[in-house]
Every structure is written in C-alpha cells, then in structure tokens.
Image (cartoon, rainbow, N blue to C red):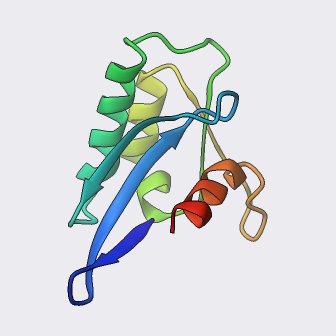
C-alpha cells in the first residue's frame, strides 16, 4: 500500500501478516515502487521466521504486477511457499492484509 507524507510525497509499505496470529511478521517501507521492494520483503520474511516455514504455508496477495512477475513467483517457490491470488474482483485471499491496511490508514 502507499502512504502520503510531507507535501504529497508517497512512501510504499510492503508487509506480510500471519493470518493465524494476526501479527505483522515483516515489513519494508520504501520511497520506490521498484521490484526490489517485494524481493527485500521476502528476504526479511525468511529471516523473521528463521528460514522455517510451515509446510502448508500460503502467501496470499493481490494481482499487482509485483506479485504476478515470474521472478517473484520463482522466489516464493524457492522459499517453499505456495502463492495464492484470488481472481480479479474477489479479494478474499488477501482480505486480512487489506483489512490491516484499512485500519492502518
């Protein structure tokens, strides 16, 4: 998501929420929307869970260009995670994260 600060400047917040505990496991704040924001978020996620993911862990996201990019999808698979994206107009998979962003803003 994005946040405004200063005089119309934007910062971008990339984070991962554990849907079971409702905890924000990791986050990254950046002034750039380049692909590195999601790659760095994945790296921080791996460190936050000490490289140990539940075997049935699922990474839910929307259909933004970052998450549909083949390299991002490859990196998710390398972590041993399953990626899930709801079809367009049906955001149930990503609802916990969107709810957090709504409350945060």
Residue at x 41% of width, y 23% of height: 78
Identify which residue, 12 or 57, lies in the foreground.
12
Left/right placement of residue 47 relative to residue 99 reads left
Residue at x 54% of width, y 25% of height: 81
Residue situated furthest bottom in the rendering: 7
Residue at x 73% of width, y 60% of height: 91
Q: Position of residue 22 (x, y in %)?
A: 63, 36
Q: Position of residue 35 (x, y in %)?
A: 28, 55
55 relative to 39, above or below: above
14 relative to 39, above or below: below
98 relative to 16, above or below: below
Total labels drawn: 0
Identify which residue, 48 or 59, lies in the foreground.
48
Identify which residue, 69 or 97, lies in the foreground.
97
The quadrant of the rendering that contains the N terminus is: bottom left
Left/right placement of residue 102 relative to residue 14 reads right
Q: Quadrant of residue 3?
A: bottom left
Left/right placement of residue 9 relative to residue 63 reads left
Q: Position of residue 37 (x, y in %)?
A: 28, 52
Residue at x 56% of width, y 34% of height: 23
Q: Quadrant of residue 27?
A: top left
58 relative to 53, above or below: below
């Amino acid at each position: 998501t994005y946040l405004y600060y200063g005089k119309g400047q934007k910062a971008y917040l990339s984070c991962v929420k554990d849907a079971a505990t409702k905890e924000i496991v990791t986050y990254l704040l950046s002034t750039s929307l380049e692909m590195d924001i999601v790659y760095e978020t994945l790296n921080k996620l791996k460190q936050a869970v000490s490289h140990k993911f539940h075997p049935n862990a699922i990474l839910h996201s929307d259909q933004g260009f970052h998450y549909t990019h083949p390299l991002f999808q490859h990196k998710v698979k390398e972590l041993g995670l399953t990626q899930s994206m709801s079809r367009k107009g049906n955001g149930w998979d990503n609802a916990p994260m969107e709810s957090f962003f709504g409350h945060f803003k």
